[in-house]
Image: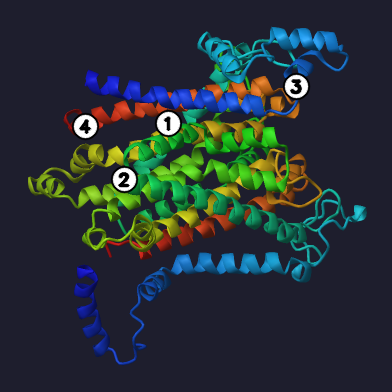
Amino acid sequence: MQRSLAVAEPMAAARAALPVQAPLRDTHRWRVWHRLRRHRLAIVGLGFLVLLVVCALAADVVSPYRPLEQAMNQRLRPPSAAHLLGTDDFGRDILTRILFGSRISLQVGFVAVGIAGSIGIVLGLLSGYFGGWIDNVLMRCMDVLLAFPAILLAVTIMALLGPSTTNVMIAIGIAYIPIFARVVRGTVLTVKPNEYVEAARAAGASQLRMLVQHIVPGTTGPIIVQVSLALAYAILAEAALSFLGLGTQPPTPTWGSMLSFGRDFVREAPWFTFFPGFAIFLTVLSLNLVGDGLSDALDPRL
Amino acid sequence: MPKYVLRRLVAMVPVLLGVVVAVFVMIKLAPGDPAAALLGVQATPAELVRVRHAMGLDRTWPEQFAIWLLGVLHGDLGASYISKKPVSELILARLPVTVELAVIGTVLAALVGISAGVLSAAKRYTRLDYTVTTLALFGVSMPTFWFGILLILLFSLYLGWLPASGFVPLARDPARHFQTVLMPSLALGVFLAGSLARFSRNSMVETLSLGYVQTARAKGLANSTVLWVHALRNSLIPTVTVLGSQFGALLGGAVIVEQVFAYPGVGTLLLTAISQRDYPVVEGVTLVVATLVVLTNLVVDLAYTWLDPRIHYAT
């Protein structure tokens, strides 16, 4: 509390000196957005992601062809005006299939991060807030999960569950629980000793109220950063599982499986394997840029 | 020091136990009847009952777990459904190939990543720094399998310098061996190199702003001495954590990279086993890799005590 008061004064003075500034928008969220906006690369990344989501939603409208539309007389055509990114071994338009493939990547990414985040955040909160044996038990469980490399764990879970889009979400979701649990636990441990938390406890706030009203808000920054990074991991993991043939099954286009099938034609049609991989790369790059920007913008030291 | 090592060893036990329990649960969750899988489709019901009894499948779960754990402790991971060979034998035959890949990948990534990060920090806000940070960002955004294919396109198909896939054992032809190892380890290491460069840069920037570094400079020491002798060791501490935690990820990544380069390691063993529903092999690989990861983490923790002598007193 004290800190933000101390900061507010010079900021108010600075604003008074700049009459063009919009009045009374000195909320925390606005300041973060303001800092993020100066991060030009993060904005470029965000722009690409927004475009990607729009294209995924409107794939039926924006795609030049149908994703399963075959044309055997158009096999393995290089990029041209008719097929901007070329065609695959069934004469299907690669751009169209990338646009439709983005749906799987984004769906799996969001749902898997949703699973990992919701479970991991709750575990991290409990662990950090209550400490003691709860913390010990939960963190040893996370250590066990972390002993399995995420991709290996996801591959093994897929082997047990069988390949399907839903199972990919579950497998990746489970694999990334520990990351969230650890980050949230660490943040809770830094928030807990704050005076305002002490004050709330002294005022007789219940455990639940303490957690929800005083601890959780302090953890949102690191969680937001973690979400953008976890999305990047999840999209890479989905592509890897599809590449290995363990993910969403053909003929549904996914970036990973397109890349994998394109490998057989890498000599005569390098675009077939190049562009799906490039789509993964751009998406993950954008998420990393946004993640970097957010972690700077949300850095409490600033 | 010995006390700390002992504490760490003791702390490892529950984690390893958890790993073992987790893999046992996986075994129990695996679809299908192991006895039927072992006998094949022509098995008679009487045979099934006999084999189920011999395998201990008619016992309670805790009993089965105890028997299985005892076997694991003796290096017995069961037998493959397909080849009927002991799983431990199959894994031991493949493990050196994968570990070599992961170690070379780690060493390459550490050399390139850490030195690039340190240089980048020393020449902050120069063109070199921007180049390094951009490349590092590309490194952590690159799907391994795609990077592997790009390497094949460039070095095998376009330049014709390296074989596109396959594996030549070291004993047969050392020169050819390293040719076949190079691209897979590069593909495997690119993510780690990127994250190490990013990490060591940030860590070095922070270290360089500390008082003792200023003092060393003020004493008139050469810039390179300050950088590589005084600052590096301290800035390495958080970097070693990343290195250790990523070694496991590298072993996981090997599963994918081996597919790209048709490489006969544990990853290929695992994926073949998955496609054949050979669950004992799947579980064996998972158990062995997880154990390796736990042991690596132990080594990393011990490396701390060497990098940061304060840890002795802290525990």
- Residue nearest the viewer, comparing B114 with B45: B45
Q: Residue at x 67, y 37 (%)?
A: A158
Depth-wise, is mark 2 or mark 3 nearer the camera? 3
- Give the residue type at disc 1: Val
- Residue nearest the viewer, comparing B88 with A190: A190
Depth-wise, is mark 1 or mark 4 nearer the camera? 4
The N terminus of chain B sits in image quarter: top left
Mark yes or no: residue B141 visible: no
- Estimate the x, y position of residue B259 in percent, counting from the top left: 66, 33
Q: Which residue is mark 2?
A: B118
Q: Which residue is mark 1?
A: B107
Contact, CB < 8 Å: mark 1 with mark 4? no
Disc 1 secondary structure class: helix
Q: Which residue is mark 4?
A: B311
Q: Earlier in the sequence, mark 1 or mark 2?
A: 1
Contact, CB < 8 Å: mark 2 with mark 3? no
Residue B15's quadrant in the figure? top left
Q: Which residue is mark 3?
A: B33
Q: Residue at x 28, y 31 (%)?
A: B304
Residue A81's quadrant in the figure? bottom right
Give the left or right position of residue B109, taking residue B181 as reference.
left
The C terminus of chain B sits in image quarter: top left
Mark yes or no: residue B24 visible: yes
Disc 4 secondary structure class: helix
Query: Gap in Å between the C-alphas at discs 4 and 2?
Result: 24 Å
